[in-house]
Amino acid sequence: MLKVTNAQIVYDNVIEAVRDVSFEVRDSQIVALLGSNGAGKSTVLKAISGVLYPEDGEVQSGAIEFDGHSLLGSAADKIVRSGIVQVPEGRQLFDELTVEENLLMGGYTQPVSVVKQNLEKVYDLFSRVAERRSNIAGYLSGGEQQMVAVGRALMSDPKLLMLDEPSLGLAPQIIEEIFQTIVNLRKERDVSILLVEQNARLALEVSDYAYIMENGRVVMDDEPAKLLENEDVKEFYLGFSDGGTRKNMRDVKHYKRRKRWLS
Amino acid sequence: MEYFLALTTSGIAVGVLYGMLGMAYAVIYKSTGVVNFAQGEVMMLTAYTAYAIASLWDVGFWTLLISVTIIAIFVGLFIEFVFIRPMLGQEVFSIVMVTIGLAVAIRAIVVMIWDADPIPFPSGLPGDTVSVLGVGMYKSQVYSIIVFLALVFIMWVFLRFSRIGIAMRATANLQTTALLMGINVKRVFAIAWGLSAMISAVAGIFIASVQDLMPDMWFNGLKAFPAVIVGGLDSVFGAALGGIIIGLVENYAEGYIGFNLKEIAGFIVILIVLMIRPYGLFGKEEIERV
């Protein structure tokens, strides 16, 4: 359903953030896009949502297609209307607006009658959000904010939900809850999910397929079970090392060498 | 006491006009981050348009008010579409320069079409006075206060409850997220310009009925500027209240101190407010000032 082919994304015409990235999200799949800071994951999501231009970014070559239509050059609101919605990194709630107003804005592209139904659905999904509906969003706790952010995205009845680091800065218990919601969403509503994460273990647990990005490139892709077996993934993304002992300096050098090879 | 009351009532009557113009500034600034230096000129243009309508057809005051506000919305949309939209993505400062250019252009256009001589404005408002709190006020002043209150209420309902109103606040809050939610930010900007022109048109009709039509009536826009600064550039209701504060201060300064302080009293208030609360009385702290 979503297909990114050889995308190259450049900021300010000179800074290459993403080079030659290809990946695919099929119908009702959960696909994880993993990688460390600065790998270019968020940039890819911004490109899909069509919001690179405020930061002077541009997809210089390659293709981004959704259900067979190119998304390149589409306005951000058209992309939302076509069924792709993003939960941005760090929640990015409208912190001066109330929770309910945030949700209403999530349903901006939908007719009023649908908005009412969806509002009830979100409140059913997150009872804590329902309790806080008339609070100013900026005063909610991190976990509640993340629920509002997910709920706000669901207000647009998306076919594809893109989550940018939903676990960022949250307590393990809350993360568990959020991820459970994500899995349920796919099961109950048949929403496809593109999950961008640094927390590789968690993401590999819930996803059907995973891509690993480094320095603006996809360096590895496979089914989670196989990636979990991979020695490099184990070492660099899951934090396992041989025998569980701490490494000495020589191994750190070795790490660097191996990293380079990996990319 | 009676002197004080007289200064107060006429101060409020002037203040609501500043308040309207202040709201017009704030609506644009809040959603787009641009200070529209052509606000006074837009007001003047719509006032002259009202004159054109009133001299062609013999319409009553309320018909005139409503028809001119509707025309003004299109004037605002036109200005946004032709002059501001091509500048999107440019630095805010460049857009502010465009509004200054626009201001000069509108002044010239008004003189070209209607000449530089003052024209009495056939507003259709009754010229007689009523007694309020024992002080005589023109009926037109009372009308302007009522219309101002109605306008503040309408704006409150609009920003608080309507989808587009909430979208305007959302865009002002976080523009990129607004884009991600599928809010057509360009349309939000256009609506802000339309609304702003509409509000300044209401102010324009009242100002013209008090002062006559003159090609330097744009100066009221500049005099309303202290109102926005006092209230905070990003607070529509702060600007409305700021207008009344400035109107009162001007009148008290003139009435008790004299020396033509009226003209500069507002700007002295700005200096003091900016020293104590640089973001205005109701503004948000981290705003970028112009």
Image: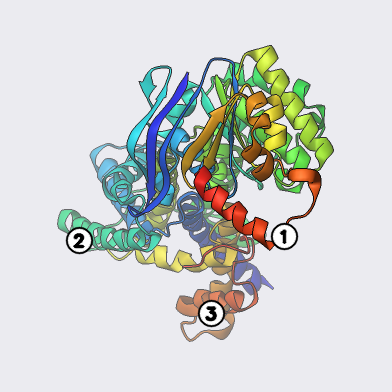
- Tell me: residue A26, above or below residue B184: above
**Label 1, on which residue?**
A248
Left or right of B59: which side holds B266?
A: right
Please name the residue shown 84% across and 36% down the image: A173
Q: Label 3 is placed on what type of residue?
A: Ile
Q: Label 1 is placed on what type of residue?
A: Asn
**Label 3, on which residue?**
B268
Q: Position of residue A68 (x, y in %)?
A: 38, 17
User: How many dots with numbers?
Assistant: 3
Tell me which chain the residue with mark 1 is part of: A
Tell me which chain the residue with mark 3 is part of: B
**Label 2, on which residue?**
B108
From the image, which quarter does the N terminus of chain B lie in? bottom right
- Tell me: residue A129, above or below residue A251: above
Q: Label 2 is placed on what type of residue?
A: Ala
Please name the residue shown 44% across and 38% down the image: A47
Viewer-side residue, B86 vs A219: A219
Viewer-side residue, A51 vs B203: A51
